[in-house]
Image: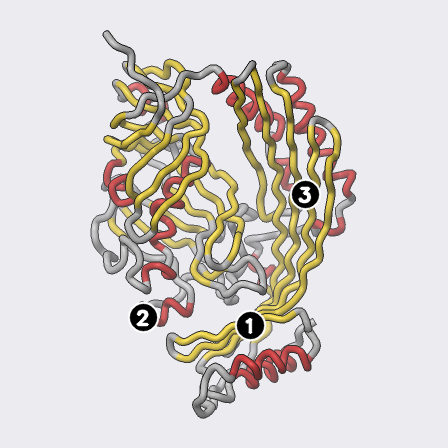
Amino acid sequence: MLTKELARRVLDAGLVTGADYAEIFYEDTYAGDITMISGKVDSASTRHLYGAGIRLLRGNEEAYGYTSDLSEAGLMRLAGSLSKAFDGAPLALSYELVEEDATRRGIVSIGRESATVAPQEKIAYLRLVDDAMVAFGDPRIVQRIVNFTDTTQHVTIANTKGKFVRDVRNQERIGATAVARDGDKSQSNSETAGGNFDIDGFKTKDLAAMARRVCEACVTMLDAPEMVGGVYPVIIHNGFGGVLFHEACGHSLEASAVARGMSVFSGKQGQKIASDIVTAIDDGTIPNEWGSLNVDDEGNPTQKNVLIKNGILTSYMVDSKNGRRMNTEATGSCRRQNYRFVPTSRMTNTYIANGTSTFEEIIAATEYGLFAKSMGGGSVNPVTGEFNFAVNEGYMVEHGKITHPVRGATLVGNGAGALLGIDMIAGNQTFGHGVCGASSGSIPANVGEPTIRIQNMTVGGAGVAAKN
């Protein structure tokens, strides 16, 4: 265990050549994974990860290294090695480490840590999901995959700002995938449920309903005609539909891109960047949500950051290092996968806030367009905001009614244009649970939104329009 006394000695060892900031991220993590395929447990594994990362800053210069040798000699050796990145005189920084138990914030409250839960209890949840998929009863479902992943991360964060913070994170997620086949046609569909909670958190999730949705979407899309490309109003459903905002806009609001002028939104704080009805938020303080934390990976309390309010860019997601470049205070937004990664600004629970329309009103107000009920993967360029996203489950809307399913639709555009094109927002905001990959590794991140409508989106597809 990292003590305050040892932390102080290691931090001081990193400061001897002129660094103006030193930090230790000390970690002990359990991770587990169980996969069931078509009713049988196919694999199960556990892993134990422990180590520490040390970071030194001097102005905008950074030195980072990590080790799994947690002895005093190992930590002092790493700090000494990193200090050689600089060649100045020590600054005689004055600081006092103040011990804090971050779990007292109560944002993430854990009863039973994952490592203490018997595998049989986890498998029972997999069985519940698999049984619901079997009960769906369609013979075209040829494979069922259910997965349980859990991670318990104990961290201690110490730095020369006086932080000595201990925290516990306990991520639990269940995923369901169905594969359907009919002749030479095949289709798959997936959904997940999870949170930063203990296993009893699944008692609040309707896992059987999730299983049925996965199966229903799978067989529905199996026989769907190909989407006909064109420019349409697009209705993007709630929950995981927020992945479009997360990827096309959220990453461009992270200080890691903004501070270097590598974002389409750099220098635009206070300017109108979205429709007047758009308010977008990143909130790491929602109790036990998938992307929530008591403190970020610099030991700063997470907070509710309003990024866009009524169309105006109000703030960015900022970590301490990039905050130096921007002359901006950190916003509790610094994250990393584990001690092997240099931390930077990342999202937590990012979503578009509820609007005043209803789902039914949005459909009824659309003469001809695409309803993207479920979104898939995509790619984005944060410098330009240009994106390309797949639609997993799509339907045509004609004369104000949802008519028939379509497959193979892709959404093409740029984040700035999409934000300005939002003209209707429902009041049914929900979350989808994803894993976001970026320079500081893969982290749990919630995406969310109510149902929204975006005018004049380019939709790709392989279908051929019918001739009159």
Q: Secondary structure at mark 2?
A: loop
Q: Which mark is residue 166?
A: none
Which residue is disc 2 drawn over? 327
Q: Which residue is mark 1?
A: 65
Residue at x-position 27% and y-position 27%: 233
The answer to the question of whether label 1 and label 2 lie on touching residues, with beta carbons closer than 8 A, is no
Q: Which residue is mark 3?
A: 199
151, above or below 245, in the image: below
Label located before the other in sequence (3 or 2): 3
Report, in whole angstroms, how far the alpha carbon at label 1 lies from the one at label 3.
Answer: 34 Å
Number of other residues with Cα within 10 Å of mark 3, as a class: few under 14, some 14 to 19, many 20 or more: many
Task: Determine whether label 1 and label 3 are within 8 Å by CB.
Answer: no
Q: Amino acid at mark 1?
A: Gly
Q: Nearer the viewer, residue 5 or 457?
A: 457
Frontmost residue, 89 versus 179:
179
- Rendered image coloring scheme: secondary structure
Q: Nearer the viewer, residue 275 or 322?
A: 322
Amino acid at pointer 3: Ile
Distance (Cα) linking label 3 and label 2 = 42 Å
**Residue 418 horizontal/vertical position (percent):** 28, 39
- Badge 3 marks a residue whose secondary structure is helix
Q: Residue 393 in the image: state x and y as whole percent.
A: 44, 25
